[in-house]
């Protein structure tokens, strides 16, 4: 019999770090897979996406997204329900869109982590960026 019943599962080290970053993203905000990789200083969007696909069910997975704002295929309605409940900025689908599913408004929803714990993420010119604003 396994004595570990009731203990949280063990994840690979990289996946554990990805999940920790996903938990930092505030309600109503998102980070892209590439943003998470940049935050960690290792891997890339595909590695983050793989970690989220395999292990992300226990964290707010809907807050780690594609850079184009398209909702996660196969999970659009579940994610959309959460985005609406959290007040995440969305762009309504155009009438020509076949599925009529909104996209994330990445300019307003994207979170750079500047106000949260983790590595310092100041812009290159050392001017403070207000929470939620992105240096362009």
Image (tube, grey):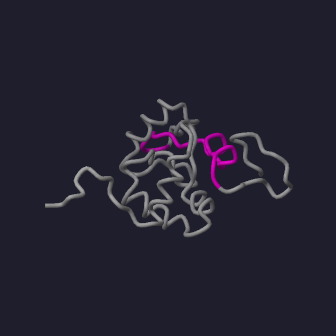
Above or below residue 44? Residue 123 is above
- Residue 69: image location, x then y, percent: 55, 48
Residue 27 vs 14, above or below: the answer is: above
Task: Return the residue nearer the eye: 79 or 29.
Answer: 29
| Residue drawn at point x = 57 percent, y = 58 percent | 36
> Mostly what secondary structure, the magenta segment?
loop
Looking at the picture, how far across and down is residue 112, in whole percent?
Answer: 66, 49
Q: Is residue 99 shown in magenta?
A: yes
Report the front residue among 69 and 8.
8
Q: Across the whole image, how many numbered discs are drawn on residues?
A: 0
- Judge by depth and name the residue closer to the eye, 20 or 99: 20
> Looking at the picture, how far across and down is residue 90, in whole percent?
56, 37
- The residue drawn where x is 62% and y is 45% is 106
> In which quadrant of the rendered image does the N terminus lie?
bottom left
Q: Which residue is drawn at 82% across and 58% down?
A: 124
Q: Give the range drawn in magenta.
A: 97-118
Q: Which residue lies furthest to the bottom in this view?
A: 43
Q: Residue at x 50, y 39 (%)?
A: 102
Q: Was residue 51 drawn as part of the magenta stretch in this picture?
A: no
Residue at the far left: name it. 1
Q: Residue 101: x, y in percent?
A: 45, 40
Of 72 and 133, which appears nearest the observer? 133
Is 132 on the left or on the right of 34, as rendered? right
């Amino acid at each position: 019999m396994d004595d570990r019943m009731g203990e949280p599962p063990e994840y690979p080290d990289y996946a554990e770090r990805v999940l920790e970053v996903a938990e930092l993203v505030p309600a109503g905000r998102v980070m892209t897979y590439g943003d998470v990789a940049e935050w960690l200083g290792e891997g890339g969007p595909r590695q983050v996406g793989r970690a989220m696909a395999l292990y992300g069910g226990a964290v707010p997975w809907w807050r780690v997204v594609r850079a184009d704002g398209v909702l996660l295929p196969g999970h659009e309605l579940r994610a959309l329900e959460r985005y609406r409940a959290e007040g995440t900025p969305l762009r309504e689908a155009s009438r020509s869109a076949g599925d009529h599913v909104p996209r994330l408004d990445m300019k307003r929803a994207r979170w750079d982590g500047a106000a949260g714990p983790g590595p310092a993420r100041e812009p290159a010119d050392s001017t403070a960026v207000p929470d939620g604003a992105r240096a362009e």
